[in-house]
Each structure stands twice: as structure tokens, then as C-alpha cells.
Image (cartoon, rainbow, N blue to C red):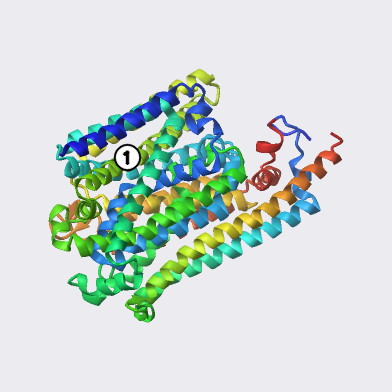
Amino acid sequence: MSITSIVMFLAIVAVTLYVTYWASKRTSTATDFYTAGGGLKGWQNGLAISGDYLSAASFLGIAGSVALYGYDGFYYSIGYLVAYLVVLYIVAEPLRNLGKFTLADMITARFDMAKVRGAAALSTIVIVLFYMIAQMVGAGALIQLLFGIPYWVAVLIVGVMMTIYVLFGGMTATSWVQIIKACLLMFGTVIISFLVLLKFDFSIVRMFSEMTTATEAGEAYLNPGLLYTSGINTISTLLALVLGTAGLPHILMRFFTVKDAQTARSSVIWATWIVGLFYVLTIFLGFGAAAFVGKDTIVAANPAGNMAAPLLAEALGGDILFSFVSAVAFATILAVVAGLVLSGASALSHDIYGQIIKKGQITEKQQVIAARIGSLVISVISILLALGAQTLNVAFLVSLAFCIAASANLPVIIYTIYWKRFNSNGAVWAILGGLITALVLVAISPNVWNPEPGKAIFVGTPLVSLTNPAIVSVPVGFICGWLGTVFSKEADYAKYSEVEVRAQTGISVSKVSH
Amino acid sequence: MARENGKNIDYEKIAKSESFRQLSKKKNSFLWTITAIFFILYMLLPVLTSYTKILHQKAVGEITWVWIYSFGLFVMTWGLAHFYVSRANKYDKDAQSIIDEFERGAGQ
């Protein structure tokens, strides 16, 4: 590790710790802790959403897969972006208008029952843990590569940092760490893309034509088919990506940090532009790495291609740019895991402890203490799981988290807002049906079983060939919600009137609460 | 009719009013129509790339149609996001006038 790397790494640590110190003085109530007081501006929340969303898997993973597989590496980028239309059109504003701290708050605004809240909190925690293990294991491996320190030390550094941010600074610190990270990430990506374009005389057409001879794949590099050969798996994965974002707890939670639906709306616009521009630039990162670093060097550093972007930075800008990009990757990881800890803690401390066990009879002070203990619990569990999961293939954990979010959370969100006849029985069925189907189908999939030793977790023949079960589990989530509803006579149309009016007008949020 | 949040809003009266029903219908048909359109355009991409070779043909220089289609989906996302905002701002005005109408009716 060079002096420049150490300096930049420490600068990130120092700045984020200072932000946490500043935020800790502004965190005294549960509302401060979970939603930063609900006073973020649209651009701030938009940057924070981008910082929460653009994980190391996006930055390093997609750049690497574009470098190695050309067009196929770019597929995910499209799904990750178009997903924001589902968030904007269907989910964001009603969620802001109905909810308080968590997804469960929004669903129980209609069905105020412990079983509904419990099911929603359970699916939140499952998604957070899957996503978290993926991020932590990826982070550990990455920091090990970038800075040459042992895996367990890397996991501990990330784990301790995220715990400090959330424990002391709550959502305020988490949001600002995410905002800083989003700015750094965009800055780094724009610089590398500029340097790549400079090499191609700023001609996109020339860049593409040079890419047809730059790799051993030849012209096939610019067409689909190098990585994904099964149509049904590609369709299923892209379905999980486009529908999953609107059910990811740490993304949904960000909408409670703004004051009303209008601000939620403008935050999505900001996020759409930042996330979209970033994903367009991943093409330049990937092409640049393929052309100026070369497949052999990329694969030698990391078989999955995760080192493509840092190596490209080194090739184009020497030690300084390499150190900067490595530091950005570190900040990227920290911002995502902090958001995950916070959303896991909200389900554990607010939903399960405060609302189910204590039945809402809990003082402001107790709520903040519970939130801090919950954050600590989620952090410790994540660190332990990550230490034990080092050898796990993390790529499938991320797409699985998206799949569970799409299967367990999205159907219940849509039904709660838009379906008059929906009832509490249907809500529980929708969540558990989607969750269990997704988990079972993954447990018997090729991600977990492979006849060749070492290729998956267990040696054996998978019972299904689907690598991502979304094409089955999302419809199952919707069907379970419908069946659970019609099998129960319960129907409260008066309550739906309230939910409908509040979701559409935000009346109890913006108008009456003053 | 007081509701449990203690704010004395007669949600049912608003929900059943002609102006709210109209807004709700207009808004929902807009949301779901556009959602269906972008969802189909998006899912068409893996279907076309997996089962046909249409998008494998060259469009501009060596750039194949699949890149043009993909970039088109990016442009679509930005365009529809802004289209949503312009429509939603109009619906906000309708919602506000429903709230005002209700408050006058409640004699506040």
C-alpha cells in the first residue's frame, strides 16, 4: 500500500467521522435517528439514494463484467436504472404519505395488527442480511486486494466504521456519508471516463469500432451472448432487478427522510439522473479496462473482474488516480452498509421491539436506546456472518436480495395502496408466500447445488435450473396475496377510504399536522 | 365522524366525493398505463436479445442496435421521470382543491 493510498484512505475515515460527530449532536429523538428529522431536501435525498444504491457491486462489479463480457456486463445497469420508474410511479409518494420509519409502518397504516407488522419486519431483516453479507464479503475481499491486508481485518474495519456512523449519527450521519460518497464516486467515474474518451479522440463511434478488435471475443464483444446464454434466466434476473428496487428496505427508508410527497418526487428525479449517468459511464470504464488493461491482467488480479476499474485508473492516471479510486471504492462500501444497518435496526427496534413487544408503549428516550441497541445487534450479526462466509459466491446473494424484495415486499406494497378488497390475511400471505418461494427456489437452484465440487455451496444436482427465481416467485407473491384475501371474509372499506385519501393527497402529513 | 388519529378528518366523505373519485381514477389510469408501457419496453429487451438476432445488427459504425435500444431505455427513464413530475404537479393542485373544498364544507 502506497503513502498516497494511506493518506486518501485516512482522509475518508477522518471526514466521515467528523460528519458523524456533527450529526451526533443533532440526533436526540427517534425521528432524528431513523429519518434525520425528516427534513432533507430533494437534492440531498437524491444524492443519498444514489449513495445508498450504487454499491461496490455496481462500481467494481459492472465495470469488471463490461470489461470481460462486453454488452452482457451492461445488462444489469439497465435494470437497476429503469427500476426507478417503478419507485417513482407506484411506490414513493404513497409510501411517504402513509409511512413513518419503516415499510411495516406503511402497511400497518392500513392493517394495524402485530402479525402484519411481524411479517413485514421479518422480510426486511432477511433482505437486509442477504444484501449485507454480499456487501461485507465483497468489501472484505476488495479491501484485501486494494490495501493488501488480511480479509478478517478488512471486514472488521468496515464493520466498526458502519457501526460508529449508525450508532452515534443515525440517519443524519448515514445520509451525509452517502451524499459524500455519491459525489466522490461520480467525480472519480467522470475523470476516468474522460481519460478513456481522450484516448479515443472523444469519438464514441471510434471507441466501439476499436473494441471489435481490442478483445479476443472480436465483434461478439459488442453483442449479447458472451455471459448469459439462457433466455429464461436472463429474463428472470432482469425482472428481479426492475421490480426489486421498489421493495428494498434501505431504499424505501430513504423516503421517510423528506417532508412530503413533492420532495420524495424530486429526490427520485435527482437519483434517476445521477444513477443513470453513472451507469452510462460504466461502459467507458469497462471498455477502457478491456482496451488499456487487458483481460489477462484483470482476471489475474481477480477472476470476477472486480479490479478492472482500479487497474484502469492506475493505467491512465498512475498511483494518484489508483489511490483515489480505491478510496472511493472504500467509501462506496461504507455508505451502503451503513444504510443497511439502519434499515435492519429500524425493523428490529421499531417494528419488533417498540411496536410488537412493547405495543407502542415506549418513551422517546427508550426508542432511541432501542434503536442504538438494534443497530449494534445488526452490525455484530453482519460482521460474524461475513467472517464465516468468506468463500461464498456473493454475486448470487445480491440478485437474491433483489428477488426477495420483488417477491415479498412489492406485491404487498401495491395491494395495500391500490386494492380496496385487500385484507390483513392477504398481506401476511403475500409477504410470506413471496419470501418462502424465493428462498426455497434458491435453496434448490444451481447457485447452491453443483455436481462439480467447489462450484457451489453443496455438491449435487440442482432441482431447478433457474439461477434467479423471480419469474416464478414474484407472481407467487401476487397470487398468495390475492388468495389470502379472498379466503378471508375480512374487508374494511372505510379504512381503505382513509388509506386512499392519505396516499393520494398526503392530507395527514402535510395539511393537518401543523 | 372522528377517526382514531384524532384529527377529525372525515376520510370516507372525501373518498366518496365526486372530485376525489375523478382525481383517483385519472391518476391511477395514468400511472398504470405508463407503467405497463415502460415495463413492456424494458422486458422486450431480454426477449429480443435471447430469442432473436434483430438487435445484433450494426446501426452506426460498429455500434449494434442493442446499444441503441439500451440507451433508448435510459432516455425513456429520464423522459418518463420528468413527464411524471409535470403530471403529478397538476394532480397536486387537484388534491389541494379537494382538501380546500372539504375544509370549507366542514365549516372550518
Residue at the (70%, 59%) spot, across then down: B26
Look at the image and tell me whether residue A183 can be seen: yes
- Mark 1 is surrounded, within 10 Å at the Cα level, by few (under 14), some (14 to 19) or many (20 or more) other residues, namely many
Element assignment for label 1 = helix
State which quarter of the image contains the N terminus of chain A: top left
Horizontal side of residue B5 vs A190, given as left or right:
right
Residue at the (29%, 60%) spot, across then down: A196
Residue at the (55%, 50%) spot, across then down: A91
- When asked about the image quadrant of residue A223, the answer is bottom left
Residue at the (37%, 53%) spot, across then down: A438
Relative to A206, say whether A358 is above or below. above
Protein chain holding label 1? A
Observer-nearest of A320 and A28? A320
Observer-nearest of A382 and A487? A382
Horizontal side of residue A27 vs A164, given as left or right:
right
State which quarter of the image contains the C terminus of chain A: top right
Horizontal side of residue A168 vs A415, given as left or right:
left
Q: Amino acid at mark 1?
A: Ala
Q: Residue A292: horizontal and vertical position, in percent? A: 20, 62
Residue hosting label 1: A331
- Count the marks: 1
Q: Residue A114: horizontal and vertical position, in percent? A: 52, 34
Relative to A357, say whether A86 is above or below. below
Observer-nearest of B11 and A459? B11
Look at the image and tell me whether residue A374 can be seen: no
Q: Residue A337: horizontal and vertical position, in percent? A: 34, 39
Q: Residue A244: horizontal and vertical position, in percent? A: 43, 53
Relative to B99, say whether A209 is above or below. below
